[in-house]
Image (cartoon, helix red, strand yellow):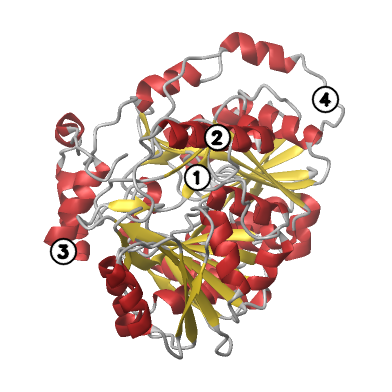
Amino acid sequence: MKKSEKKVIKINWGQIIKRISPYNVKKGILYLRHYGMKEFWVKLTERFQADDVDYKEWYENHRVLEKDLEEQKNVHFFKEPLISIIVPIYNTPITFLRQMIDSVQQQSYEKWELCIGNASPEKKEIRQVLEEYKSDKRIKEIAIPENKGIAENTNKAMTISEGEFIGLLDHDDLLAPNALYEVVKVLNENNLAEVVYTDEDKVTADLEEHFRPHFKPDFNLDLLRSNNYICHFFVASRDLIKRVGGFRPEFNGAQDYDLILRCTEQAKQIVHIPQILYHWRVHKASTADNPASKMYAFDAGKRAIEEHLVRCRTKGTVQHTKDLGFYRVKYEVCGEPLVSIIIPNKDQSEALKKCLDSIREKTSYRNYEIIIVENNSEEPETFAFYKKIAGEKIKVVTWEGEFNYSAINNFGVRHARGDYLLLLNNDVEIINGDWLTEMLSHCQRKEVGIVGAKLYYPDNTIQHAGIIIGIGGVAGSVFVGLPRAFSGYLHKASIQLDLSAVTAACMLVKRSVFEQVGGLEEKLKVAFNDVDFCLRVREKGYLVVYDPYAELYHYESKTRGAEDTKEKIRRFQTEIEYMRSHWIGLLKKGDPYYNCNLSLTKWDYSLKNNQRS
């Protein structure tokens, strides 16, 4: 998307009108009070954008067919573990209870047991329903005379389970009929797997409409610290759940979040299945429908993350965001290490001055140096400006070769003294004063190699909120052109998360990591050098973190000029071929931080418009 392009926001008024009801009007008033008028309208507009691909049609086109289920029943796996589905029930509506049990009975993988912890044994209607299913010996019940809360009720239900793996199912939700089959399939493909999770969607109380699908990435530590994105369907080995101590009642409301954090900390392998295999029912009492109604649950989630950080020996504080159930972790900066800011420059002294002034005037972190790498400037004003600014914090060094972004930055690094290197374009402007502190706090974490920022065009639309491998053929930024006030698909433009790549227009990297991978690849003179660099850092086992709380304006590529000559077009094609040949495995498999059901021709987490294969 070019700088001049605008995202046209199309609102699905039909969906808004369809959802008008006394209950939803009341809920809307609660949200209005929470967000305020301006932000409420932004949330409403974003929530009801018209989709290019209708999920209802997509779901019908991708749900498992009866013939496939019959074939699955005849499959014999090498490992066929017993899977215990644990369901605590309390005053469950009878229709919901029946449908939940039916969804388990309809599984194409038949080696399961359903362990129900009944915390309302005095309810005659519930007793009658459970009696009806007694002929299926795989369905087990334990009476819980006094309701102790969901954590203790779930622990109690687990005492009657015998499975090698435990799956968690809420009393009013549904499993897709192939859910357990797909779980067992990946357990056979991944010998060390101790945690498996799937994609999910929401379904209306009457089961008439599936909506709001959650297509998840593979395991993503920083996303999990921002939100319990794993949620449903969650399956873990009995041994792992036993090792971490099961559910803890002090986290009721976020007991699954707490358990997932503890399990993923210790799991030998975590596997994600990119299929909608769990249906989270929405009704008036459910958190899925009205998150603001259960603030205690979000406070419990905050405490779960705080304890997780302590166990990981990571210093940080956890904050609620306005989007309840989503959190911000603020990490501590240890000491005051020197950060070397590397800025390539050719002429454009006005843009450079604006960039430097914003760093000097707005940056709260003070221990930095600036290395300006001069590259073939021609204007006398540029050299006069260099003489004016050179001093204790700013050094100008000269790269005499042709424009080669990778070589220029590698050259600049050789003149830098800092243990942390910030690659920065000359056409950016700092917005928030703690931008460098924010990025450094992530980069100091032992597991992190690179940190990227959130960049905006001058018109306050998003220019960069991370890069996805495969978009546009090789790699592309997501949420380009989205209004700054919007938060993106499941708030992914506005929360901390791990990605495969971020732009070098503003990228912080440990010097030790930069040297470990040999710096930027100089064969990539202009395009994809930052993507290739991030992927090589990822290969070494480090995380690449996108941090939306470091915000800058980006006036975009003033130094380089347009790709409008035969030579430049040929060079660009060569760089595309370099990426395709070096990263063909990843391009074929797909970005682990994206989801194979999402589009590679759009940048906004749109559904892929494909038919059943």
Q: Quadrant of the N terminus?
A: top left
Badge 1: few (under 14), some or many (20 or more) residues near its Cα, within 10 Å? some
Identify the residue under disc 2. 576
Between the residue at mark 2 and the residue at mark 4, the CA separation in whole angstroms equals 41 Å
Give the mark nearer the N terminus: 4 vs 3.
Answer: 3
Name the amino acid type tagged 2: Ile
What kind of element bears circle 2? helix
Badge 4: few (under 14), some or many (20 or more) residues near its Cα, within 10 Å? few
Residue 190 % position (x, y): 79, 39
- Disc on res. 77: 4
Name the amino acid type tagged 1: Ala
What kind of element bears circle 1? loop
Name the amino acid type tagged 3: Gly
Between the residue at mark 3 and the residue at mark 2, the CA separation in whole angstroms equals 46 Å
Residue drawn at (45%, 52%) of the image: 466
Give the mark nearer the N terminus: 2 vs 1.
Answer: 1
Residue situated furthest top in the rendering: 67
Name the residue nearer the viewer: 170 or 413.
Answer: 413
Identify the residue under disc 1. 527
**Looking at the image, residue 605 lies above or below residue 29:** above
Between the residue at mark 3 and the residue at mark 1, the CA separation in whole angstroms equals 42 Å
Q: Is residue 146 visible?
A: no
Q: Quadrant of the C terminus?
A: top right
Badge 3: few (under 14), some or many (20 or more) residues near its Cα, within 10 Å? few
What kind of element bears circle 4? loop
Residue 310 % position (x, y): 63, 78
Identify the residue under disc 3. 36
